[in-house]
Image (tube, helix red, strand yellow):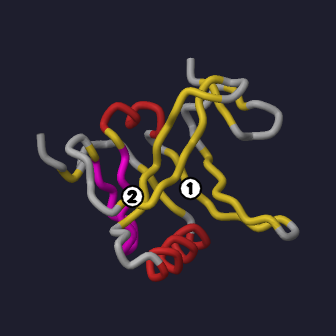
Amino acid sequence: MTTEEFTSATTVTMTQNALRHVRKQVDQHPAAIGIRLAIRKSGCSGFKYETQWVEEPSGDDQIFHIDGVDVYVHHEHLVLVNGIEIDFVTEGVNSVFQFRNPNATAECGCGESFTVT
C-alpha cells in the first residue's frame, strides 16, 4: 500500500494560530515533513488525540495539505476526525492544541478525551 492524498469529502482544517505554530516547529525539526493527527483509546471518555512529527509517512496515511502544512492521518482514524478543526490556543502560560471535532458526542471534563457514538 502506498501513501495517497485523500481527496474525498473528508476534511481536516487548521486555524491560522495552529498553522503558525506548526510551521515554526517544523522549521526547528528539519527531519519533520508534517504533523500526524492520531487517535488512541485512552482517557475517561474513550479516545484521545495525539500529535506527532512525521519524518516518513506510513503506507496507510491520508495527507491533508493545509496552507503549506501537511497533516497525516491514518486511514482508520478518518471517520473519527472528519470535519475536525485544529486550533492552537494560549491560556495564561499554557499553550496547547485544541480540537473541535463535530463527531465527538461527549468530552471528559478536562477536555483530554472524547466519545463518538
Q: Viewed as shown, does residue 19 lie left or right of 54?
A: right
Q: Give the residue at x 34% y 41%.
A: 74
- Badge 2 density bin: few <14, some 14–19, many ≥20, Cα 10 Å: many
The majority secondary structure of the magenta stretch comes to: strand
Residue carrying label 1: 86
Name the disc covering residue 112, or none.
none
**Quarter-wise, where is residue 115 in the image?**
top right
Q: Viewed as shown, does residue 87 lie left or right of 93?
A: left
Q: Viewed as shown, does residue 69 lie left or right of 39?
A: left
Badge 2 amino acid: Val
Q: Viewed as shown, does residue 70 lie left or right of 50?
A: left
- Callout 2: helix, strand or loop? strand
Residue carrying label 2: 71
Q: Does the magenta stretch include residue 68?
A: yes
Q: Give the residue at x 37% y 60%.
A: 54
The residues colored magenta run 62-73
Badge 1 amino acid: Ile
Quadrant holding the N terminus = top left
